[in-house]
Image (cartoon, helix red, strand yellow):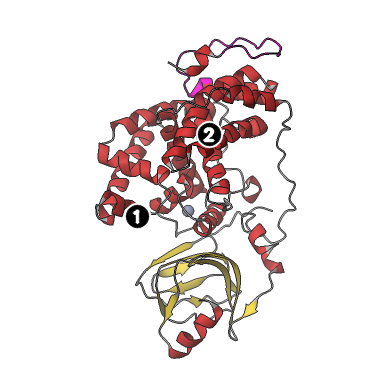
Amino acid sequence: MSLHHPAPISHHPGEELLLAYAGGGADEAVSLIVAAHLAYCAACRRRSRELEALGGCLLQELAPVPMASGALDAALLKLDGIKPFERPARQASGDCTPSVLRPYIGGDLRDVRWRQVGPNLSYVPLFRRGAIRARLLRGVPGSETGAHRHAGLEYTLVLKGGFSDETGSYAPGDLQVMEGDMRHSPVADPGEDCINLAVTTGPLKFESLLQKIVAPLFGF
Amino acid sequence: MLAYARIRPFPRRKPALRLNLPMMPQAQELNALLGRVAEMRDQAAFAALFAHFAPRIKAYLLRLGAPPALAEDLAQEALLSLWRKAHLFDPAKASAATWLFTIARNLRIDTIRRERRPELEPADFMPEAELAADDGLALADDEARLRAALKDLPADQIQVVELSFFADKPHSEIAAQLDIPLGTVKSRLRLAMARLKRIMGEAS
Ligand SMILES: [Zn+2]
């Protein structure tokens, strides 16, 4: 099952973010969200390959540091025992879930066991490294996340449905990056549930008192 | 100049096919060597690739702060990965150097950072605008041009491009390390990228 979406992608990662992914400097959560965007976006896939080619050139230009004597002989002795790599056969996704996400979800999006945060919002934590968290968020059509700012960066990739806020409208494959003090209040578009992959590098700072109290309980 | 010009024959092995290698292997020669490994499990070709790439991958890992013994082990491991995965190499998609770069990059993320590297799988999307059969050659030319273009960049731009690949830290930390404002790092990077893009664009 492939992810060829008819809707054009209009929100892409910036050059810097693609460079961090291609160069290997981005952490796992940011790499995951960029890779998931690439699953939808041919233009960024091409650009990311060009940036990898830049990495290849830099590798070529590096002043070689000699290997220990005997390193090649040691490698040659191992060759006969090495079997060619076989890509593990994977079952195709039943609902167009990008395959890069599936090991983190443990299956397809439709198999996710959501945790309810309110009547309209649910989420699933995927993983956490220090202050960086990756989660799936789901909002029913019309649901509001509540106006907030960010202590760090917030990356949001739409997987299903869509949402809109002060900065524009986001459809599947679109990636939004909110920095530090940018304020926004996303609302899920009408139609189907909006499912997003979200990566945050610091807690969200909500404006409403209730959310200020409740959000930390859920780790937001 | 290059180590593999003086590789001695390996002991207890059938005589290796003699390759007529130039002193400095360029993209196409490296691709051809990789093709020989994939198709014939050619150990002489492997030895040539090892001589060329292992010391560069070691240098790459050292630049990223790996201790010397680990850099040595991982460079060795990267070349064994090449032997294991050579049949997956597609010269229409990447040059040999680019492919090796991605192997080294991912190996470092796996073993040194102990993180998973989220990678795309071909199953995810439709094949793009079909790559022509001679795209491998075009890519090899691109690599030569890109390397020349890189050398032509002003030193301060080369520095930020290199650090994006060899520093393993966000641009904000690169800025702190260089003691320049983040905005300057970003603008140098943008200038460098625009220039490289223009040169590559003119080429194609
Ligand atoms: Zn894109």
Q: Is residue B183 visible?
A: yes
Q: Quadrant of the N terminus of chain B?
A: top left
Q: Which residues are magenta?
A: B8-29
Q: Nearer the viewer, residue A109 or A20?
A: A20
Answer with the quarter of the image where residue B162 lies.
Answer: top left
**Depicted B45 relative to depicted A205: above or below:** above
Q: Residue at x 53, y 22 (%)?
A: B51
As drawn, the label of residue B57 is none
| Residues behind callouts 1 and 2 on a single chain | yes
Circle on res. B173: 1
Graded by Cα atoms within 10 Å as few (under 14), some (14 to 19) or many (20 or more), the crowding at tag 1 reads few
Taking the magenta stretch, the answer to whether it contains residue A167 is no
Q: Residue furthest bottom?
A: A210
Name which quarter of the figure residue A58 lies in.
Answer: top left
* Label 1 element class: helix
The verdict on residue B26 being magenta is yes
Point out residue B68 in the picture as x, y percentages from the top left corner.
48, 37
Q: Residue at x 60, y 35 (%)?
A: B77
Callout 2, which amino acid? Glu
- The dominant secondary structure in magenta is loop
Q: Is residue A53 visible?
A: no
Q: Residue at point 49% right, 33% down? A: B57
Residue under numbered circle 2:
B72
Mark 2 falls within which chain?
A: B
User: Looking at numbered disc 1 in the image, what kind of residue is underneath it?
Assistant: Glu
